[in-house]
Image (cartoon, rainbow, N blue to C red):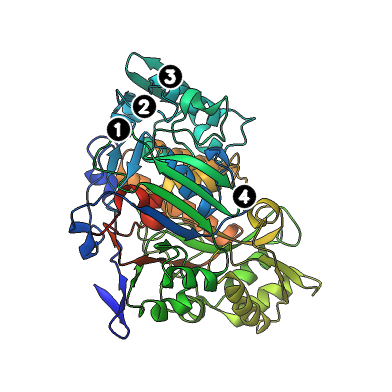
Amino acid sequence: MNKYRGQGRAIAAHSGFSRRAFLAQSAAFGATAPTVGALLANAAWADTPQQGGTLKVGVTGETSDSMDPARALSIASILCVKSAMEYLVNVTADGQLDYRMAESAEPSDGGKTWTFKIRQGVEFHNGKTLTPEDVLKTMQRHSDETSESGALGLMRGVESMKVDGDYFQMTLLSANADLPYLLSDFRLPIQPDGGFDDPKSGIGTGAYVLDEFEPGVRATFKKFGNYWKEDEGHFDGLECLVINDSTARAAAIQSNQVQAMFPVDPKTAQLLGRAPNIDVVSAPGGNLVAFVMQTDVAPFDNPDLRMALKLAVNRQELVDKVFAGLATPGNDFPVNSSYPLFDDSIPQREYDVAKAAELYKKSGHDGSPIVLHVSDVAFQGAVDAASLFQQSAQAAGIPIEIKREPSDGYWAEVWQQRPFFATQWGGRPVQDQIYSAGYLSSADFNETHIRRDDVDEMILGARGELDPEKRKEIYSKLAYVVRDEGGLILPVFGNTVSAISKQLGGYHEHPALFLMNARIAYECWFKS
């Protein structure tokens, strides 16, 4: 375990893990992923769980937040949704499937059809018993073009769905070895009657019942008395506090107003970790931070200008100065070595002032400022990262103007609404999930507006390819296209850095989403 030394405290940097052998070793088309170097957990994981108390968590959020999982975007909304609702499956920190509302998943027809056995005797917060019909209706709602669900891109690959007794079955347009992993997407929890009646109700089968929801301010929950799993959900209640200012979040955990907070400003992480009552935990993984150019909007429809901007980023400087070393350089495509079938032979893009200047001149851009819209709610340190980008681009004669946007409303009014903006994506278990959500022509979260038949064919072709070497080759070709021809400037994969009170037992990091895959209230407890 690497450590950043402080006065008696440290930042614990958990080891990342590679799952490149994932499909090669997975006997049932991805139904059981092997452990390929699990994350190290802190010593508290081994403590005996205690019951009681109210966990208070400080995170970022917006007044546009919703308990409708189809619209969950901010950290606060994702945490709230996942605390109240559960999924067919979760994915553990070491990449294995954790069956929740499903007891099993079986592929047939070469991975084109998947059959899920639905768990019996599980109760929703409103007293209704979970049925396979609830699962069917949930998937139907997120497949509806009018639902505006963020999971719609994932669901467009479904040909048909049906219920057969205790089983829910999905038949796909083409085989998909990763389907159970895709259904762990945070927007796909199971709701009574699929959420058609009241998707914002917060009613689910999770460990906590929604009590009060004030978007952009706070949400409170109480323990669900009839929760199906006795060894999870140890708190009497949960309070999610929206604290968008990083200094205020740090002060809140130092004064024990909250017992967990995310994100931590990397520049102050070491100092915060010296506090006697706090652990600052850092986990590398697939968490990407980026600047997005929409490729069908001028001037970003010019490939020479796009490449000039990509070459004008000093990635190592961002790692060192903005992320204090708690990050690794990105390569302008959305996966890294934490993903299965990653091609580590793809050359790392470097800062090249001369080539950037040459391509900028070749692009014929008129020299007017190129406006980059940012807010630190997009990712921790986004404004500082944009400022360094502005300076490194200026050295190549490329004028970038930074438009600092308000935190509240960023995801609703700026993200995807402006042609050049900051973004952040948490890691996903498999490559198909991030490519399907963000790079298919039909994807609602296609930030860069890349809409190409060859890209679609590669994404869909990789889904159904069961030979891991052939699948890896497809993903490699896809990475080159996105990297060299797309609109993604991905300078950094940032570690997931959280601050946790030493009062909490059971905490361990997860390489995908923040705060243990947003399941901190399920798996942690207050020490006696």
Which image quadrant is residue 273 in? bottom left
Residue on which the image places disc 2:
123
Q: Which mark is residue 257?
A: none
Q: Is residue 418 left or right of residue 287?
A: right
From this view, report whether residue 370 is shown above or below residue 452.
Answer: below
Q: Is residue 234 left or right of residue 204?
A: left
Residue under the image location 64 percent in, 51 percent down:
63
Judge by depth and name the residue closer to the eye, 372 or 296.
372
Q: Please state which amino acid type lies under the numbered disc 4.
A: Ile
Q: Please state which amino acid type lies under the numbered disc 1.
A: Trp
Residue on which the image places disc 1:
228
Residue on which the image places disc 3:
133
Q: Tell me how far mark 4 sits from mark 3, CA to CA.
A: 36 Å
Q: Tell me how far mark 2 sits from mark 4, CA to CA.
A: 42 Å
Q: How many marks?
A: 4
Identify the element where label 2 is drawn.
loop
